[in-house]
Image (cartoon, grey):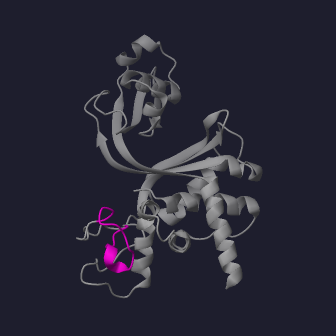
Amino acid sequence: MASVEHCLYCFEALAAHLEGRKSMSLAEVQKSWAEYLASTAPEDDDDDLGKRLPALRRLAAASSSSASASSSSTSSTTSLQQSASSGVSTPATSISSTPPPVQPAVTESPLFVTWNTISPRHGHNLRGCIGTFEAQELDEGLSSYALTSALHDTRFSPITLRELPSLEVAVTLLTNFEDADDAMDWELGKHGLRISFYYHGRRYGATYLPDVATEQGWTKEETLVSLMRKAGWVGRKDKWAEVELKVVRYQGKREELEYAEFKRWRDWLTAASSRE
């Protein structure tokens, strides 16, 4: 699934491009984020530590050549699996004493990168969203689509350096693609939709990610009509069901991050580098 590190990496790719510097790699971001969490975790704050556990597990797995009998033997930077006995002290309710099975690392996936602006007055507003249904190596794919969605979404002007503090990024990794039996064979809040259809001899197509319909408060019918409009359909709203739609449903594992968290991590990284 998408992770905080994936979001940090998108911010890093965009910030580096706008600042004219070399971007860190995804692996470097993952390693640095784990070290950041380990160095800033309050010793006595169990709730906060619980939230930081996934990255701490990765750090413990990466820095230890062996683990105790009650810990899992290995952990990848993306599978997030390591038992509490690897050196991280946690309350009994935070993690089971029996290590869960190690999941395979996600190294490639279809993906979308979404940029939003956030303001106290206007809330969240879309600033760019572009992705691909073709599986991408995450290191290359995330950085590429972070820039494409920020700079080349034709609905918006390119994002500028001064806008960075107002941004939020969301990464969605797409899974479980299935042909729907009909236009209504999907669930609100669970499935994203990819539709295609012909109208007056012309082919149309568009997609909505899984969170769009629920964020807008749409019904399934309203979602389909809006998606057809997005594709360019100009027929009568009450005639939408007469159009033969091909619907592919899919699921998305989404994570989001605001600039403030990215900035805290970058400031820590700069300070840590200066001490070396």
Q: Quadrant of residue 72?
A: bottom left
Decide whether residue 93 is among the magenta residues: yes
Decide whether residue 9 is among the magenta residues: no
24 or 140: which is nearer to us?
24
Residue at position x 64%, y 70% in the image: 268
Q: Quadrant of residue 91?
A: bottom left
Residue 42 horizontal side relative to residue 151, left or right: left
User: In this picture, which residue range is highlighted in magenta?
Assistant: 80-95
Residue at position x 29%, y 66% in the image: 92
Q: Quadrant of the N terminus?
A: bottom left
Residue at position x 70%, y 52% in the image: 164
Q: Is residue 13 visible?
A: no
Please identify the residue farthest to the front as the structure is shown. Answer: 44
Rendering coords of residue 142 (x, y %): 53, 58
Rendering coords of residue 82 (x, y %): 33, 73
Rendering coords of residue 261 (x, y %): 60, 58
78 or 61: which is nearer to us?
61
Q: Quadrant of the C terminus?
A: bottom right
Q: Is residue 166 visible?
A: yes
Residue 125 horizontal side relative to residue 193, left or right: right
Rendering coords of residue 125 (x, y %): 61, 36
